[in-house]
Image: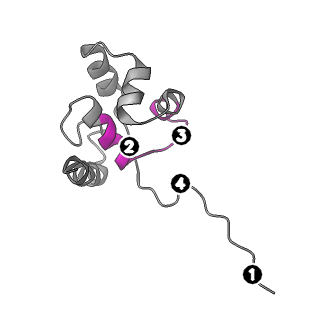
Amino acid sequence: MPEPKKKRNRWSARVTVKLDDTALRDRAAELNLPWRRVADRAGLNWTTLCAKRRGRRPISADEVARLERALALAPGSLLLADDSEAQESASLCGAKLSLK
């Protein structure tokens, strides 16, 4: 009899980070972009972005890098300063993704 498949948590493969919502909000306001436009530029659903901003859903380093590119910010600028490991991870992710 075959073994049953293990259920995999869909968040288990991602490195989650802490988002600096104040910096995100300030940059979006500076560019005069509504949240739907920010989400579209980053390739996210706007309701998902809102949930991630409020901490209701985890956000990955890749998603932070996409938001930074969408808002023309330096890699790692949307991460909380106390999360140095995440800063490095997102910077590397942003650098890799910007080469495409």
Disc 1 and disc 2 in contact, CB within 8 angstroms: no
**Distance (Cα) linking label 1 and label 3:** 31 Å
**Distance (Cα) linking label 3 and label 4:** 10 Å
**Distance (Cα) linking label 4 and label 1:** 23 Å
Camera-nearest residue between 87 and 40: 40
Q: Which of the marked residues, 4 or 1, is nearer the chain's N terminus?
A: 1
- Which residue: 29% across, 19% down? 26
Residue 6 spot, x, y in % from top left: 68, 70
Image mark for residue 51: none
**Distance (Cα) linking label 2 and label 4:** 13 Å
Kind of residue indicated by mark 1: Glu
Counting other residues with Cα less than 10 Å from the Cα at mark 2, is it few (<14), some (14-19), or many (20 or more)?
many
Q: Nearer the viewer, mark 1 or mark 3?
A: 1
Q: Is residue 50 above or below residue 8?
A: above
Residue 63 lies in the magenta-colored region: yes
Dividing the picture into quarters, in which one does residue 74 lie?
A: top left
Residue 7 spot, x, y in % from top left: 67, 65
Counting other residues with Cα less than 10 Å from the Cα at mark 1, is it few (<14), some (14-19), or many (20 or more)?
few
Q: Which residue is mark 2?
A: 63
| SS for dot 3 | loop
Image mark for residue 11: 4
Kind of residue indicated by mark 2: Glu
Q: Which residue is mark 3?
A: 57
Kind of residue indicated by mark 3: Arg
| SS for dot 2 | helix
Camera-nearest residue between 90 and 96: 96
| SS for dot 4 | loop
Q: Which residue is mark 1?
A: 3
User: Which region shows up in magenta?
Assistant: 51-67
Outermost right residue: 1
Kind of residue indicated by mark 4: Trp
Disc 3 and disc 4 in contact, CB within 8 angstroms: no
